[in-house]
Amino acid sequence: MSMTEQPNGVFPAVCPLDCPDTCGLLLHKENGKIVKVTGNPDHPVTRGAICNKVRNMAERVHHPDRLLYPMKRSGPKGSGQFVRMSWAEAISEIAEKFGSLSAEHGPESILPYSFYGNMGVLNAESMDRRFFGRLGASKLDYTICQSAGSAGWKYTMGFGGGASPEDTLNAKLFIVWGGNIVSTAMHQAVWMEQARKNGAKVVVIDVHKNLTGRRADRFVPLHPGTDSALALGMMHVLFERGLVDEAFLRRYTLGHEELREHVKAYTPERVSRITGVPAADIARLAEMYGEASPSHIHIGNGLQHHDNGGMAVRTIACLPALTGQWMRGGGAFKSNSAYASLNDEALQRPDLRAEPRARTINMNKLADALLTLEPKIRALFVYGSNPAVVAPDAQRVREGLMCEDLFTVVHELFLTDTAKYADIVLPASSSFENTDLYTSYWHHYVQLQEPVIEAAGESKSNFELFKLLARAMGFEEEAFREEESAVVRAALDYPDNPYLNGVTLERLREERFVPLDMSPKKGYLDRLKTPSGKIELYSEQLKAIGLPPLPTYMPLKEGYDGENRGEREAISAYPLMFISPPNHNFLNSSFANVAKHRSMEKEPLLQIHPEDAAARRIEDGQLVEAYNDRGVYALKASVTEAMLPGTVISQGLWWSGPNGDSGSLPPETPGGRQRRGLANALTSSRLADMGGGATFFSTTVEVRLAEAAPQVRKQ
Ligand SMILES: Nc1nc2c(c(=O)[nH]1)N[C@H]1C(S)=C(S)[C@@H](COP(=O)(O)OP(=O)(O)OC[C@H]3O[C@@H](n4cnc5c(=O)[nH]c(N)nc54)[C@H](O)[C@@H]3O)O[C@H]1N2
Ligand SMILES: Nc1nc2c(c(=O)[nH]1)N[C@H]1C(S)=C(S)[C@@H](COP(=O)(O)OP(=O)(O)OC[C@H]3O[C@@H](n4cnc5c(=O)[nH]c(N)nc54)[C@H](O)[C@@H]3O)O[C@H]1N2
Ligand code: SF4
Ligand SMILES: [Mo]
């Protein structure tokens, strides 16, 4: 009997969310429904502990708002009015529309838009990629999350992998830099605490005292976007005081002599003016870093969501090379996804592409793509993502979604803010209803999900959906008939990645947690994949794309710049920097519609420093508006000293209705009635310095009491 046929029992599962931990789960099932989700104690890294979000996951999976059948728009765009239709009708309508658009305007008039709402590779990046490739649609550049930082890391290290979780246990100094691991990578936080028990000091470098900062032995607050300056100041001290590992620099790095000269300009005094960190603290931090061994730096995503985010990550990635930490059991982590690289050609089948040279559209530019791009986007197919909430410049994204001549399909579990703009909504099955393959971008275990419950209503997986669409479009290739198990096998069959050695479907079925073969990591430093084969402190590649070849502080385009502008006009555009990182109980915008998770977060808050609040006559608990030229976000003020003056913080990607009200939040939600707009109404779609990355946090705003605001506003 398969797992889905057994009404009761405890079944293994994998957390599908976009989180580094990729926990092993146990689903407790009664009468065919999940009644409880716990951690699987047998998982070698996550060891049975899971976060609060997923402990309450049953609430989401069996939520009464789950979409159960396809629907078609019956009211004006964005009104959220739909009527039921059959799958057969839905598929043939979409296929007809795609066929006629391709014939009339070319297939590039169709744009797929997706992200990792479900991290399973079958559903996130296999049949869908085959389908849109074969169709010849515009390609999407998946840049919204970590691309600036990953590019910065790769220019330096050549390979998208760093320290293993196991390496961090022995650290004597543990630095969390621009990450909130207590909320966003909880098992790294568990391992950090274990390292602390073994004598490690914990330093958190952040623009606000987040939950992780509150646990630090030393919290270092700084101005947003100034991290590369701080790291360069540390290098200045490391070289000056002879705290570098000369032998390591000679053997494994390129450009250490140039760097040594270059960082002379970054004196602690100068760096203090840029970052807001006192000069003595910069020197002390450098000394701690130079003296503690082994040391570990966890590089979070926060600092790379800036205009200069690629350079920030690159600069920090140079630090362990200066102290030779890579040979001393220490190092740094940005992402470990490259160790688990799968056979993408087999998964995505680029060979099927009808238009190999089809244009590529950066997903951060969705607003422009819908409103101004020529030739026009005439159809948008969204799945595994909620761009009306998560994409930058969200107000303009919504304007784009309102275009009468845009045909929008959304495949979702819920009627999200994005789905409300759809012409056709398709119900998606949850990951616990599907087969899928999961790798982690942190630990080194591969896992398999097999269906545990029946698909809700008429919902279908992404994998199934794109097979159906392919058939309707007349795509005859065998690639569109493959079963899940065949695709898993093909993905794992990848001799180019030696770390994948020995990972097979059979072992996944039997052992559940199959470790990557980490033996090739031993010789890692001797054959780095940079052009020189060394850690590139100096990068010709960066020079070739017009960026400084040595790590360099580059002020934000929109934001704080304490060096090049006077103390008073230190900010470009509006006077406050607006930082909107994730919160503890949502996963990006997922869970924001689940009452349980929302009640744990209570309501969106704008954290503002007492000085900034007083200057605006704002008191704790008052309704305020953060605004700039792009939009408005009305929410409750929380007056706190968690950050330096000049920065305001709002955590969590809350949903918001198209009319600027609180959207799908029921009116009884605290603040629900008064809240208007959303964080990304304020953010810019400007691209970061590297990798086409997003710049969510290089945003400036002004804040005023909501009562003081004009009552009539557009939308
Ligand atoms: N609970 C929960 N967990 C999650 C997620 C979630 O939404 N909720 N999202 C998942 C995803 S997709 C991702 S990418 C990761 C992200 O998780 P993290 O890697 O932790 O990154 P962020 O949460 O984006 O930002 C972390 C911190 O960066 C800070 N920050 C902002 N600008 C700067 C700066 O210029 N310098 C410095 N030093 N710090 C700065 C913010 O204040 C924030 O505290 O978490 C994953 N895990
Ligand atoms: N202001 C600001 N904006 C941000 C960020 C920030 O820190 N601040 N963080 C950014 C980052 S790092 C990221 S990664 C993005 C994340 O942005 P998204 O990837 O859009 O993440 P979610 O909001 O979780 O939306 C995922 C959606 O996928 C749906 N889904 C889940 N499983 C499936 C499935 O199997 N099939 C289908 N069809 N749908 C499914 C879920 O119901 C959910 O609505 O947001 C970015 N936006
Ligand atoms: S969201 Fe992250 S921490 Fe929570 S269960 Fe999933 S993988 Fe584990
Ligand atoms: Mo992300």
Image (cartoon, rainbow, N blue to C red):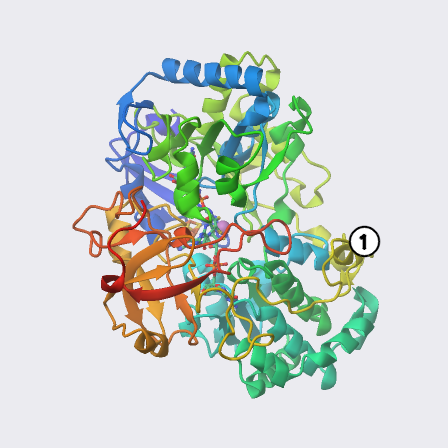
User: Can the viewer see residue 426 in this picture?
Assistant: yes
As drawn, 575 above or below 545: below
Image-based side of 137 in relation to 596, left or right: right
Instruction: Tell me the kind of residue under disc 1.
Output: Pro
**Would you say 405 lies left or right of 621 here?**
right
Q: Which residue is rendered at x = 60% and y = 81% of the image?
A: 288
Please give the name of the residue rendered at 28% of the width and 59% of the height, measured from the top-left corner.
Answer: 635
User: Which residue occupies the foreground of this view, 330 or 259?
Assistant: 259
Which of 228 and 287 lies nearest the eye of the viewer?
Answer: 228
Q: Which residue is mark 1?
A: 531
* Occupied quadrant, residue 498: top right
Point out residue 479 in the picture as x, y percentages from the top left corner: 60, 20
Tag 1: Cα neighbours inside 10 Å, few (<14), some, or many (≥20)?
A: few
Frontmost residue, 624 versus 325: 624
Where is residue 409 shown, x and y percent of the image? 42, 27
Q: Position of residue 476 (x, y in %)?
A: 59, 12
